Image (spheres, helix red, strand yellow):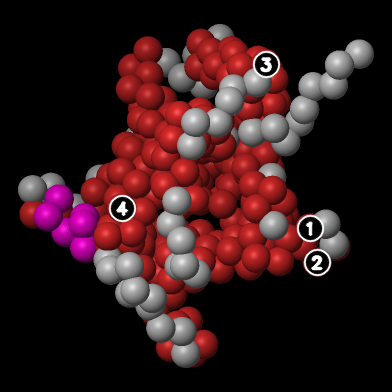
Amino acid sequence: MSSHHFLLLITLAAIWGSSFMFIRISAQELNAVWLTEGRVALAALFLFAVAIILKKKLDLRQGITPYLVIGLLNCVLPFILIGYAAQGLTASSMSILNATAPTWGAIIAAFWFREGMSFGRILGLLIGFIGVGVLLGLHSTSVTAASLPHAAAQIGGAFFYGLSTTYARSIEKLDSFSISHGSLWAAAALTVPLLLVTPMPHSVSVETSLSLLILGVVCSGVAYLLYFKLVMEAGGSAALSVAYLIPLFGTLWGVVFLDEIIGWHTVLGGCLIVLGTMLTTNTLKLRAI
């Protein structure tokens, strides 16, 4: 990986790591549905402006079905689950649990594409789940009994990220910009019916508004552009490694800006989850001695 691509990787990890902090801030006044709609709508508008500047047209040769599916699996469902998770978890815990997304992707792909599960992958799953147990069960400042549903929601969000990534692999002849742009508009449209049955926030502070703006434009719109640029120039494996850096930045921003407390359980659980993810995704391979 060149120094340029490495810088892109670090920047992307820092941006996506910060998203959990902004979700935490926004979730104090916005419920998960309105938070999701605000985020995807702002991101879609940003990419629409980029499309106009770059003169990129949305590819509709395969219709709108791929955009609807990815919009649902990659935006609507995980964003709502993560928005709910933010009401009971710290930003650092959210970012660490989110690192299980590549693991879920590997499990789903094994069944979807009938790929084999090697010993290393199975061991990675076990280590990853042990890491989740360490993170969730060994310290009251991380996750309490009352916040276990929020932790389950965060893991569910990571699951849908894995599912959407696997589905995206089966789509042919669609460029990455069209997928990201079209899926965001689809997500915005799919969330509208939920708004009709979800109470509207009574008031929104300036802090929440700014957090939502950054979350939509920077953490979604700009991040998508950086991610797919990395995929196209450095390859999918290099881009996938961002998942291992996000917990580092998610924890860092939580400590610096939200005064979150980081205990040994957070460090140990996070390391086990990342190790398990690397084994499951074959980023780290066991060698016979």
The one of 240 and 259 positioned closer to us in this rendering: 240
Looking at marks 3 and 4 on the same chain, the residue that comes earlier in the sequence is marked by 4
169 magenta-colored: no
Are the residues flagged by discs 2 and 1 in contact, CB closer than 8 Å? yes
**Residue 14 position in % (x across, y down):** 65, 53
Cα distance between the residues tagged 3 and 2: 35 Å
- The residue drawn where x is 83% and y is 57% is 1
SS majority, magenta: helix
As drawn, 119 above or below 45: above
Instruction: Please give left or right for residue 126 compared with residue 31 in the image.
Output: right
Q: Which mark is residue 69?
A: 4
Amino acid residing under circle 2: His
Work out whether mark 3 precedes mark 2 in sequence or the reverse, and give the earlier one: 2
Disc 3 designates what residue? 119
Residue occupying the point 34% across, 46% down = 73
Secondary element at tag 3: helix
Q: Which residues are magenta?
A: 188-194
Disc 1 crowd, CA 10 A, few/some/many (<14, 14-19, 20+): some
Work out how far the residue at label 3 is from the one at label 4, CA to CA, in angstroms.
32 Å
Can the viewer see residue 31? Answer: yes
In which quarter of the view is residue 12 placed? bottom right
Which residue is denoted by mark 2 in the rendering? 4
